[in-house]
Amino acid sequence: MRLIVDKTDFVNKRLDNFIKENSELSRTYIASLIEDGYVKVNDVIVCKPSYKTKELDIIDFEERENTTLDVVPENIPLKIIYEDDDILIIDKERGMVVHPSNGHHSGTLVNAIMYHCKDNLSSINGVIRPGIVHRIDKDTSGILCVCKNDESHKSIAKQFSEHSNIRKYFAITKGAISKDSGTIEKPIGRDKRNRLRMAVDTNGKEAITKYKVIKKYKDYSYIECELLTGRTHQIRVHMKDMGYPLLGDLTYGKVDRNFKELNGQILHAHYLEFSHPRTNERVSFESKLPDYFVSILDKLDKINE
């Protein structure tokens, strides 16, 4: 996560208090992250919770995952696109964390599906990710597949590994992309200067993204991307490398003057296709554009007038 000290009220605050006020994490947990070297200020690790923030400080941090975390089922409404004895297809809301961590004990997708599915979830990924074959980031909305038994999990996971499934996303980039379509083939690995991020790296893993421009604005582009591989942050990293970071993505881009309220990439997983684990028939699922995405497109239309 990235935070920027871009308001006068944020200046000269203790680092742990500043992060607490701008996240859902507890101060105790934040302090432990800082002391253990998980927080950077202006790309430099800061290990003192008492550090005082300065104007335009850029603060990056990541959360630790605890594989022994107790996960409690919670009655949280889910938007279910499809369900049978093997799979559950969910349309995830923007802002919902997929699986629990020390900073997010509750309110996650896993808490919700454990309540909905009871004991009918695959166990391959353990107590933190029951049923979860793939994930999408907290601020990415859209389609997610959950497996209700180990057999379906193995089948779907194999398809993801072999890239025999189809995954498509809608996104908005900063900048009007010059080419209307293209294929980006650049390997991705952990950013050597900032472990919170991924980056194009010749020593990284193969990563292929196809894109096409749906609508071009003066300073923005509305695009569709298809993942031919599935690397962490793949679309975000590839578009950043092209010079067109996703709107709202403060990890790989900057605050946009027209959308200062955004703190998270505008990215929506709208299409998923794979072979059903029991019948082997091809099945596909779609999610229409959510309201938040539509409202941004409406604003872009007005800006473009």
Image: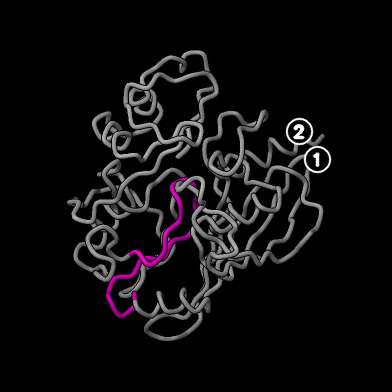
Among numbered discs 1 and 2, the one appearing first in the sequence? 1
Q: Quadrant of the N terminus?
A: top left
Q: Quadrant of the C terminus?
A: top right
**Magenta stretch contains residue 135:** yes
Count residues near mark 1 (Cα–Cα under 10 Å), then give few for <14, some for 14-19, many for 20+.
Answer: some
**Where is residue 258 shown, x and y percent of the image?**
67, 30
The picture places residue 28, in percent across and down from the top left corner, at 24, 31
Q: In the image, is 101 to the left or to the right of 183?
A: left
Q: Give the number of the disc on residue 229.
A: none
Q: Which residues are magenta?
A: 132-153
Q: How is the image coloured?
A: one colour
Whole-percent x and y of residue 184? 68, 64
Residue sitting at x 41%, y 76%: 156
Q: Amino acid at mark 2?
A: Ile
Q: Position of residue 181 (x, y in %)?
A: 76, 62
Graded by Cα atoms within 10 Å as few (under 14), some (14 to 19) or many (20 or more), the crowding at tag 2 reads: few
Rendered position, 72 above or below 18:
below
Disc 1 versus disc 2: distance between alpha carbons? 9 Å
Q: In this image, 225 relative to 303: left or right?
A: left
Q: Quadrant of residue 117?
A: bottom left
Q: Amino acid at mark 1?
A: Lys
Look at 37% across and 22% down and name the residue there.
51
**Which residue position is annotated with label 1?**
218
Q: Is residue 223 magenta?
A: no
In front of the other: label 1 or label 2? 1
Image: 244 above or below 213: above
Check contact, mark 1 vs mark 2: CB within 8 A: yes
Residue 303 marker: 2
What residue do we see at 43% from left, 47% from top? 138
For the point 69% across and 54% down, the residue is 223
Q: Secondary structure at mark 2?
A: helix
